[in-house]
Amino acid sequence: MIKRYHYARDVEEALSLLAAYEGRGAVLAGGVDIARGLPREIEGLIDIATAGLSGISAADGGIAIGATTTLEEIRTSGTVRGYLGGFLAEVMEHVANWALRNTATLGGAVVSAHPWADIPTALVALGAEVRWRTEERPERAPIEELYGRPFRAIFRRAVLTEIRLPRWDGDFAFEKIARNAGDIALINCACGLGLDAEGKIAWARVAVGATPFRGTRLPGAEGILAGEKPNPDLFAEAGERAAAEAKIGDDIRASAEWRRRVTPVIVRRALERATLRVTRGQ
Ligand SMILES: Cc1cc2nc3c(=O)[nH]c(=O)nc-3n(C[C@H](O)[C@H](O)[C@H](O)COP(=O)(O)OP(=O)(O)OC[C@H]3O[C@@H](n4cnc5c(N)ncnc54)[C@H](O)[C@@H]3O)c2cc1C
C-alpha cells in the first residue's frame, strides 16, 4: 500500500529514493498504468515528471527521446516527423486517445511493455536502444535484449532515462487492427526495408505483436525478403512465413485462428506501404 509520494528533482534523487525503498518503491512517470494498480508491496511512489528527462533531439543520424517525453509530444514533434517519414508519429496516432497520450510517457510504455501494446512492436522493429541508470552506473541495451531480461525487476532499482532510435537507410510502416480507433490492438505489426542500387531489398525488419504476446521480430520472414526485388508474391510469402513463425494464441479479444489468418494480411500491407515510402523518398 502506498505510504509516501515523492517528487524527484533529478535522476540521482530518484535512484537514492529507490535504493532506500529496497524494492518497495516505484517510479511514476505519466502514471496511467500505475493508476490501474500496483503490486501490494509498493510503499513509495517516486514521481520523475520533473527530473529533467523530457525532450527529443537528433542523435547520430537517428533520434534520442527522453524517458518522460509524452506520447503526444512525440506525435507532434517536428524532429519525429522528420525521422523515417514520420513513422513513429504514425504509430502514436494509433495509441489510445489524445488525453491518454498527453500524460503517458515513452519510458512508461517501454517498462509497462503490455503484450497488446503498439509501442514495443514498433520499437523492436526499429532496433531501439534503451538507456537507464542504476546507482552504480549508466547502462544500455537493445530493447529486444532488455525484454529478454527480468526488466520489471531491473526498473525497481533503476531509472530509464532515454530511448535512442538509429538511423535507417529505408523506411517503415505500421499496421494495427482494433475494434475501433481508440482501442487496444487485436494484432499489430511494424515492417521496414531498404533497397540497394539494383532495387533489391538490402535489409528487412518484420515485427508482429498483440498476438497476444509482446511484439517480436520474425527473422524467418525477414530472411525471405532480403536480396529479392519487392513484389506482391514475395510479400505474400513473407506474410505466410510470419504467420507460421509468430507465437500466436487466443485471448479475450481474439482467437488464435483469426490471428493466424490476419497476420499475412497486415504484414503484406505494412511491407507494401514501407516499399512505397522508400521508392517515393528516393
Ligand atoms: C487505457 C489505456 C489504453 C492504452 N492504449 C494503448 C495503445 O493503444 N497502444 C499502446 O501502445 N499502448 C497503449 N497503452 C499503454 C500506454 O502506452 C502505457 O500504459 C503508458 O505509456 C505508460 O506510461 P506512463 O508514463 O503513464 O507510465 P507509468 O504508469 O508512470 O509507469 C508504468 C510502469 O513503468 C515504470 N516506469 C515508468 N517510467 C519509468 C522510468 N523512466 N524508469 C523506470 N521505470 C519507469 C513504473 O514504475 C511502472 O511500473 C494504453 C494504456 C492505457 C491505460
Image (cartoon, rainbow, N blue to C red):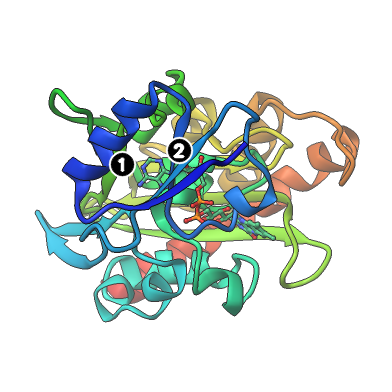
Q: Residue at x 80, y 70 (%)?
A: 180
Specify the quadrant of the image occupied by residue 52: bottom left
Q: Is mark 1 within 8 Å of ligand 1?
A: yes
> Residue at left 28%, top 68%?
83
Image quadrant for the N terminus?
top right
**Mark 2 to mark 1 CA distance (whole Å):** 12 Å
At label 1, the amino acid type is Leu
Q: Is residue 131 visible?
A: no
Say if 101 sits above or below 157 in the image. below
Most foreground residue, 34 or 43: 43
Label 1 Cα crowd, 10 Å radius (few <14 / some 14-19 / many 20+): many
Mark 2 beta carbon near ligand 1 (under 8 Å)? yes
**Left or right placement of residue 117 versus residue 119 in this view:** right
Q: Residue at x 64, y 25 (%)?
A: 245
Residue 282 in the image: state x and y as whole percent. Answer: 26, 71
Q: Is residue 116 above or below residue 1?
A: below
Is any part of residue 239 visible from this angle? yes
Looking at this view, name the residue that lies furthest to the left. 60
Give residue 23's quadrant in the image: top left
Q: Position of residue 193 (x, y in %)?
A: 38, 50
- Rendered image: mark on residue 183: none
Direction from residue 54 to residue 227 in the image, left or right: right
Which residue was labeled with disc 1?
160
For residue 26, the mark is 2
Disc 2: CA contacts within 10 A as few (<14), some (14-19) or many (>=20)? many
